Image: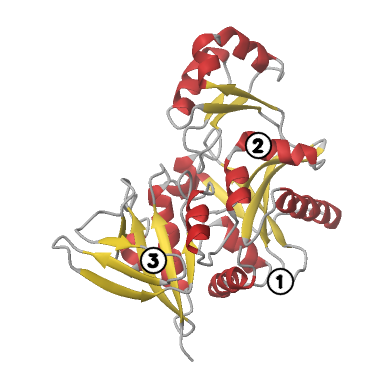
């Protein structure tokens, strides 16, 4: 039986480039090589798509080093509609084949990868791909519209306002008036379309608010300001249902941050000692059932398929959805695979399941 050829696409133009590389390293190291033949393609920070080494250690986060995809003279030539043969051209103009591709596994995080852009590109080529479709990816990437969809579906979300760059530059007083209605500090100031806590600040004194907005605007022209909630940070992982069934939801996990203001980029990827990922989270059966139900509804509200991680705050008033991540971190130690391992699906089997889902539910 011939193996399915899986194009693993990673890196990308976003600020989460290196995190995508680390996710790819995890997939490379665990994918079932008896079933799948892997074709790794990296995307440089300049957007060039290049053949790269199938070497997990080359792309892993080690000793604080952040891996980067570099252009080394060869670029990919994508197939035309109806064709599945991937080629590359070298510096001398010579064109060589990388063979036909059955499915693409895009583990790109952030803009130009997780936001519907690469999904639309693959739709144009009629190539099956792992994960969410164009709309769900775009909606899940934009915190403003994610929250709007959740509110329309009756899903509780964190209190928030949106500030656009033009409004902030032209009339900061009106923006501050909107923010004042959130009820004071603490506030979280975030780029509307970024992940991995890039550009996020916790504001405990309004004297620091302008600097926080400036940092967020370095990553996007739209900023979401959320009222800081007192509660536990808990998460569920979601997988698309098979054969028309409803989405599946994992057990819950909890994030406990130690010695930091919040679960920022450093805590996620460089300072593991500053955070405990507790799987499964200590919840009552009723709490877990309620959380899983909300996670499933959130996934369906954006038209999700494939996978997602839904992040919550558990407060005295109940569960509040913080956000949904349509391409969550996927290293062996990341929360998404850890939640599924605790739910009975091993990391390698999870990769196989996602590929099978992509082929079954071709967008």
For the residues bearing labels 1 and 2, Cβ distance under 8 angstroms:
no
> Does any portion of residue 206 appear in the rendered image?
yes
Q: Earlier in the sequence, mark 3 or mark 2?
A: 3
Q: Is residue 144 left or right of residue 274?
A: right
Instruction: Give the residue displayed 37% in from the left and 63% down from the top.
Output: 78
User: Residue pushed farthest right?
Assistant: 286
Q: Nearer the viewer, mark 3 or mark 2?
A: 3
Q: Secondary structure at mark 2?
A: helix
Instruction: Give the residue displayed 56% in from the left and 74% down from the top.
Output: 352
Instruction: Pick whichever, 114 or 121, lies toward us.
Output: 121
Find disc 3 in the rendering and name its residue.
79
**Crowding near the residue tagged with mark 3, few <14, some 14–19, many ≥20 C-alpha atoms within 10 Å:** some
**Crowding near the residue tagged with mark 2, few <14, some 14–19, many ≥20 C-alpha atoms within 10 Å:** some
**Is residue 347 positioned above or below 224 on the image?**
below
Q: CA distance from mark 1 to mark 2?
A: 27 Å
Number of dots carrying numbers: 3
Q: Nearer the viewer, mark 1 or mark 3?
A: 3
Find disc 1 in the rendering and name its residue.
242
Q: Position of residue 160 (x, y in %)?
A: 68, 27
User: Residue pushed farthest bottom?
Assistant: 1
> Does any portion of residue 314 appear in the rendered image?
no
Instruction: Pick whichever, 15 or 344, lies toward us.
Output: 15
Q: Is residue 111 left or right of residue 315?
A: left
Q: Position of residue 199 (x, y in %)?
A: 47, 32
Instruction: Give the residue displayed 52% in from the left and 55% down from the top.
Output: 119
Instruction: Pick whichever, 221 or 321, lies toward us.
Output: 221
Q: Secondary structure at mark 1?
A: loop
**Crowding near the residue tagged with mark 1, few <14, some 14–19, many ≥20 C-alpha atoms within 10 Å:** some
Q: Earlier in the sequence, mark 1 or mark 3?
A: 3
Instruction: Give the residue displayed 70% in from the left and 31% down from the top.
Output: 229
Find disc 2 in the rendering and name its residue.
145
**Is residue 202 positioned above or below 172 on the image?**
below
């Amino acid at each position: 039986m011939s193996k399915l050829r899986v194009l693993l696409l990673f890196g990308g133009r976003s600020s989460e480039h290196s995190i995508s590389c680390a996710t790819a390293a995890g997939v490379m190291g665990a994918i079932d090589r008896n079933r799948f033949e892997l074709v790794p393609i990296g995307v440089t920070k300049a957007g060039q798509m290049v053949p790269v080494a199938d070497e997990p250690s080359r792309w892993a986060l080690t000793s604080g080093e952040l891996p980067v995809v570099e252009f080394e003279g060869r670029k990919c030539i994508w197939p035309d509609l109806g064709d599945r043969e991937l080629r590359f051209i070298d510096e001398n103009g010579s064109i060589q084949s990388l063979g036909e591709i059955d499915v693409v596994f895009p583990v790109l995080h952030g803009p130009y990868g997780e936001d519907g852009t690469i999904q639309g590109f693959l739709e144009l080529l009629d190539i099956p791909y792992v994960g969410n479709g164009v709309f769900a990816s775009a909606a899940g990437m934009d915190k403003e519209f994610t929250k709007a969809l959740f509110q329309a579906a009756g899903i509780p979300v964190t209190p928030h306002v949106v500030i656009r760059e033009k409004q902030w530059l032209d009339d900061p007083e009106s923006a501050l008036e909107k923010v004042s209605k959130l009820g004071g500090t603490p506030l979280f100031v975030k780029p509307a379309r970024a992940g991995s806590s890039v550009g996020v600040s916790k504001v405990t004194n309004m004297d620091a608010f302008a600097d926080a907005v400036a940092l967020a605007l370095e990553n996007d022209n739209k900023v979401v300001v959320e009222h800081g909630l007192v509660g536990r940070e808990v998460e569920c992982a979601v997988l698309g249902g098979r054969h028309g069934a409803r989405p599946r939801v994992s057990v819950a996990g909890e994030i406990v941050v130690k010695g930091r203001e919040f679960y920022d980029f450093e805590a996620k990827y460089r300072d593991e000692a500053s955070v405990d990922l507790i799987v499964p989270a200590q919840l009552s059966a009723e709490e877990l059932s309620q959380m899983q139900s909300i996670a499933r509804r959130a996934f369906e509200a954006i038209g999700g398929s494939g996978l997602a991680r839904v992040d919550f705050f558990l407060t005295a008033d109940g569960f509040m959805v913080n956000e949904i991540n349509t391409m969550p971190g996927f290293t062996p130690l990341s929360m998404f695979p850890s939640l599924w391992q605790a739910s009975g699906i091993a990391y390698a089997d999870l990769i196989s399941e996602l590929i099978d889902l992509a082929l079954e539910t071709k967008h």
